[in-house]
Image (cartoon, rainbow, N blue to C red):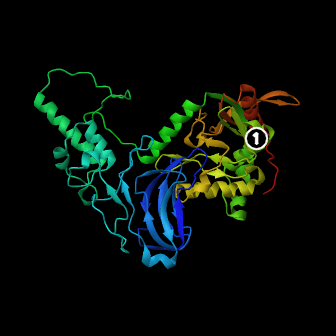
Amino acid sequence: MAKVELVMPKMGESIMEATILKWHKQVGDQVEMDETILEIATDKVDTEIPAPMAGTVLEILHQVDEVVEVGKIIAIIGTEATADTAPSPTIKEAPAAVNGHAAKSTNPSPKATPATTSTSTTPVKTVSTNHANNGTRFYSPLVKNIAKEENVAMAELESINGSGKDGRVTKKDMLQYLENRQQSTHQTAAPTSISAPVAHSNGAANIQSGGDTEIIEMDRMRRLIADHMVNSKHTSPHVTSFVEADVTNLVNWRNRVKGPFQKKYGEKITFTPIFVEAVAKAIGDFPMINVSVNGNQIIRKKSINVGMATALPSGNLIVPVIKNANRLNLLGLAQSVNDLANRARNNKLKPEDVQDGTFTLTNVGTFGNVMGTPIINQPQVAIMAAGAIRKKPAVMETEYGDVIAIRQMMFLSLSYDHRVVDGFLGGSFLRKVADYLEGFDDQQTI
């Protein structure tokens, strides 16, 4: 009887864990090769994981909302021959918080449910612990932790109306209950003075919703992005350099060819592939900008994989990667940029689309900003921001002397890791990118 272990896939060098969003298959279900079996999420991408083979789901080892390390086994799939011999679900203990993220189970009850071929069967039995031991319904570790911190006794917890599946108490239910309880306490006490906010252990004030304030919970992606940004600032001493570039030639060229380009190739030509082309060329001139750091070691990357920060409809950012950008011509870069941007906005990116980046480009000009100081996308050591292109008076040197003319100008900024990139390297690389943009051949054909 053959069994295949389905493991949490690696999403990139800096991604060590992922959150399970949804299981499309349950224990006993048949699955075809490459059929979606579950959805996972990291701070960079939400993606579907396909089955590595056709067969039957024998075991599911981690539940929805659990945070699972890369490489951990998350399910067992058997061959078609084992369809009638699927073992009972593995009994697992309620998961603890992982790296500050409380893992949660979607099981509505602590009681075991036998494996069947029905998709409604709960595949993994979870044994509730601590606070929930004496309760009559299941409570997630997050809810139990909140109850413990806020001194909510089991009898009180049992009285809370749950809005989750089968009446399960959710985090939102707990926070709403605690808010109402505190307001009731305040009204009963009828305080005659206003005291200063109580500081939590993390230094944040105890801010209550109501009046002129509103508490908005970060969504999952925003929380992970926040952690990623703070980690980057803790890891790398950031320095930012700026240059201004005259990009009149490339603007005029794009304005002239964008119609014929789309008609001929079926692709829009934006400024992004032109910026990526210049970045890839400059990395070839200054390869030590294309590195990462591991302790006291500098790891030089031979592949030039340029990530492009892409805004999502939710307001969050994601960074799909153009692999081997230095090997693509302008048409190939335009196709890659358009494809990745479209799939990012439609949540269709695959894990490999956001991994192995060696340098990142962000176009803050799309927001109308003239410059920015971006945060390094770890474990890379540099990120470049392209500002808005604006018409400005500029001094031009001609054979007849200096003249003032209206030119298309833009600022470029480079944030870099000062542990391994000094001012000479960072500044020279950025100037080289500007040189390539300024020297763009506006006579080239499409």
**Can residue 216 be seen in this snapshot?**
yes
Q: Which residue is mark 1?
A: 283
Q: Residue at x 18, y 20 (%)?
A: 193
Residue 413: name its quadrant.
top right
Residue that extends furthest to the front in the rendered view of this protein:
1
| Residue 17 or residue 75, whichever sits in front | 75
- Say which residue appears at 13% left-offset and 32% top-offset: 187
Location of residue 198 in the rendering, given as x and y in whole percent from the top left corner: 28, 25
Tell me where residue 101 appears, x and y as whole percent.
41, 43
* Amino acid found under the numbered disc labelled 1: Ile
- Tell which of 278 and 267 is nearer to you: 278
Looking at the picture, does residue 54 appear above or below residue 206? below
Count how many numbered circles sit on residues in the image.
1
Q: Is 102 in front, or is 428?
A: 102
Q: Is residue 394 in sight in this rendering?
A: no
Whether 91 is drawn above or below 321: the answer is: below
Q: Secondary structure at mark 1?
A: helix
Q: Is residue 26 left or right of residue 441?
A: left
Frontmost residue, 347 versus 19: 19
Residue at 83% across, 29% down: 397
Residue in the image at 51% along x and 48% along y? 17
Q: Quadrant of residue 223?
A: top left
Q: Position of residue 318 (x, y in %)?
A: 55, 48
Structural crowding at the residue carrying mark 1, measured as other residues with C-alpha within 10 Å and reported as few (<14), some (14–19) or many (≥20): some
Query: At which x and y percent is residue 444?
Result: 82, 52
- Say left or right for 257 vs 387: right
Q: Quadrant of the C terminus?
A: bottom right
